Image (cartoon, helix red, strand yellow):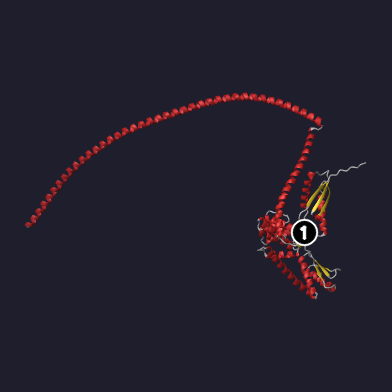
């Protein structure tokens, strides 16, 4: 119990002491806090006083700086105003000077205008005097010369025309000669080189369809009883058989050379076999037809290989083979096409053009001649049509179209094919023509020459390769001869078709004749 009381007392004492300590600690803290607050207040008052002092100092500095800036700007403004005032004064002085100069110039212009007016009046007076003098001189000239002004003009114009004609003729002659010399030299080198390298036959090929008979008795067997054999032959082959008094020969006539060749082979086989009747004729015809077709294909293939042309359509190759049985003025068209291909290729090599394209165009240029008897149109139109049909090169088509001048040659290859075609056709012995066409061509040539005013006579010589024209000396002068020759040449080119070239030779002769009595 005592122990409990002791503990209670101890606890109570501890509580009392704790309360007292807390109270004393609070009082102490209050005193410490009050002391701290007092010192903080003093510090704050000191900071505020310092801040106010600094603010007053900065305010004074700012005011001073502002005053300095205002003073500086005022000085700058006054200086700028002064400069502008000086510039304005200078401009005013310049304007005044310009006004004074303008006044002086105006005065000078007025004086010059007065002087000019005086000179104009003087010039007008002098012009009037000149016109009067000129008129009097013209009147005097008319009296002296006996010509009026219009007559004198006509006389001068006539003399001038004569001089101009002379000068024009000389100039044309000079230019023509120079151009001809240059062109001939270059062309001669190219063509000579090409022809030297191309070996061709120099004789025209004569295509005849005459079948030889072992004896005249064979004619009767070919005719047959009541003519049935010959009728069968003509019906199947589509040709006409001419059996006349010619010994041991029958002539085969047809516009189609392939039909004529088939008929010729059929006749030869029948004559060799000896059995001639309608059934045998049909058998031999079919056999000959197959042989000719095979020959056409072989000729086309051989021509393509010889020309060195690749990639041709099969139908075009067959058409080339058919040219073997076509002739033009006695010249075999297949040989002609190969010759043109060779020459065009050689000339292309000489001038650096496309050799393969030139050979191809040369080989195909007359392809339309294989179709003349089957379709309507010229061989040029047919050749162009079939070349396009089988997808030939545009340059080749153009060369076919232009090789006779139907259209203007626009490519080098077309020009080469034109030249090669003319060379092949015009070389000696290449072609022949019948007498009627030959005579007509010569007559037409002379007719064109005599159609010009002042032409007295004309003579076509050297197989139509030259025409000599006699002109009237009192109608055509020496200078006019050159112009007339050009006009005749142009008309010949427009109206005539001919191989090679035609020389126009004009002759003017003046003679004086008198009699001694």
- In the rendered image, which residue does mark 1 sit on? 428
- Residue furthest left in the image: 2
Mark 1 nearby-residue class (10 Å; few <14, some 14–19, many ≥20)? few
Q: Can residue 367 be seen in this view?
A: no
- Residue furthest right in the image: 517
Identify the image quadrant of the N terminus: bottom left
Query: Closest to the observer: 366 or 240?
Result: 366
Q: Can residue 511 be seen in this view?
A: yes
Identify the image quadrant of the C terminus: top right
**Residue drawn at 11 percent across, 52 percent down:** 12
Give the quadrant of residue 313: bottom right
Residue 323: percent from left, percent from top: 73, 64
Residue 123: percent from left, percent from top: 69, 26
Query: Closest to the observer: 308 or 402?
Result: 308
Asked whether, in this view, residue 375 is left or right of residue 73, the answer is right
Residue 265: percent from left, percent from top: 77, 70
Query: Closest to the observer: 346 or 125?
Result: 346
Query: In this figure, what is the number of numbered marks?
Result: 1
**Residue drawn at 12 percent across, 51 percent down:** 15
Query: Closest to the observer: 239 or 416?
Result: 416
Relative vertical location of residue 478 with respect to residue 304 in this rendering, above or below: above
Give the quadrant of residue 413: bottom right
Asked whether, in this view, residue 469 is left or right of residue 88, the answer is right
Relative vertical location of residue 266 with respect to residue 354 in this rendering, above or below: below
Give the quadrant of residue 366: bottom right
Q: Is mark 1 on a helix, strand or loop?
A: loop
Residue 116: percent from left, percent from top: 65, 25
Relative vertical location of residue 36 with respect to residue 200 in this rendering, above or below: above
């Amino acid at each position: 119990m005592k122990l409990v009381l002791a503990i209670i007392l101890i606890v109570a004492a501890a509580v009392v002491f704790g309360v007292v300590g807390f109270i004393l600690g609070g009082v102490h803290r209050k005193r410490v806090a009050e002391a701290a607050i007092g010192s903080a207040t003093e510090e704050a008052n000191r900071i505020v006083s310092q801040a106010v002092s600094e603010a007053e100092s900065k305010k004074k500095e700012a005011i001073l700086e502002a005053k300095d800036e205002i003073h500086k700007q005022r000085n700058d403004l006054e200086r700028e105003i002064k400069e502008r005032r000086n510039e304005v004064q200078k401009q005013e002085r310049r304007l005044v000077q310009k006004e004074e100069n303008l006044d002086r110039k105006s005065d000078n212009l007025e004086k010059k205008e007065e002087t000019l007016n005086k000179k104009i009046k003087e010039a007008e007076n002098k012009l009037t005097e000149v016109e009067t003098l000129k008129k009097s001189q013209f009147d005097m000239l008319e009296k002296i010369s006996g010509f009026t002004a219009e007559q004198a003009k006509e006389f001068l114009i006539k003399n001038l025309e004569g001089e101009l004609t002379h000068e024009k003729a000389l100039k044309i002659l000079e230019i023509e000669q120079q151009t001809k010399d240059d062109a001939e030299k270059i062309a001669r080198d190219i063509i000579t080189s090409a022809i030297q390298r191309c070996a061709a036959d120099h004789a025209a090929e004569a295509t005849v369809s005459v079948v030889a008979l072992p004896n005249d008795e064979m004619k009767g067997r070919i005719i047959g009883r009541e003519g049935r054999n010959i009728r069968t032959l003509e019906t199947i082959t589509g040709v006409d058989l001419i059996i006349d008094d010619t010994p041991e020969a029958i002539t085969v006539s047809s516009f189609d050379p392939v039909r004529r060749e088939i008929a010729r082979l059929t006749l030869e086989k029948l004559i060799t076999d000896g059995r001639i009747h309608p059934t045998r004729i049909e058998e031999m015809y079919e056999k000959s037809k197959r042989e000719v077709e095979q020959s056409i294909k072989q000729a086309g293939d051989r021509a393509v290989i010889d020309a060195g042309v690749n990639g041709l359509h099969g139908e075009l190759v067959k058409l080339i083979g058919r040219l073997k049985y076509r002739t033009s003025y006695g010249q075999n068209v297949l040989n002609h096409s190969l010759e043109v291909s060779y020459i065009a290729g050689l000339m292309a090599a000489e001038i650096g053009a496309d050799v393969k394209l030139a050979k191809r165009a040369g080989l195909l240029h007359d392809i339309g001649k294989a179709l003349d008897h089957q379709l309507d149109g010229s061989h040029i139109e047919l050749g162009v049509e079939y070349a396009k049909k089988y997808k030939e090169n545009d340059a080749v088509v153009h060369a076919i179209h232009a090789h006779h001048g139907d259209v203007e040659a626009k490519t080098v290859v077309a020009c080469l094919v034109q030249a090669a075609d003319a060379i092949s056709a015009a070389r000696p012995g290449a072609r022949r023509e019948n007498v009627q066409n030959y005579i007509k061509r010569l007559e037409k040539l002379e007719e064109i020459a005599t159609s010009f005013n002042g032409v007295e006579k004309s003579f076509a010589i050297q197989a139509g390769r030259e025409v000599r024209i006699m002109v009237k000396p009192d109608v055509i002068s020496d200078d006019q001869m050159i112009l007339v020759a050009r006009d005749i040449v142009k008309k010949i080119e427009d109206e005539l078709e001919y191989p090679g070239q035609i020389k126009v030779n004009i002759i003017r002769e003046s003679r004086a004749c008198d009699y001694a009595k």
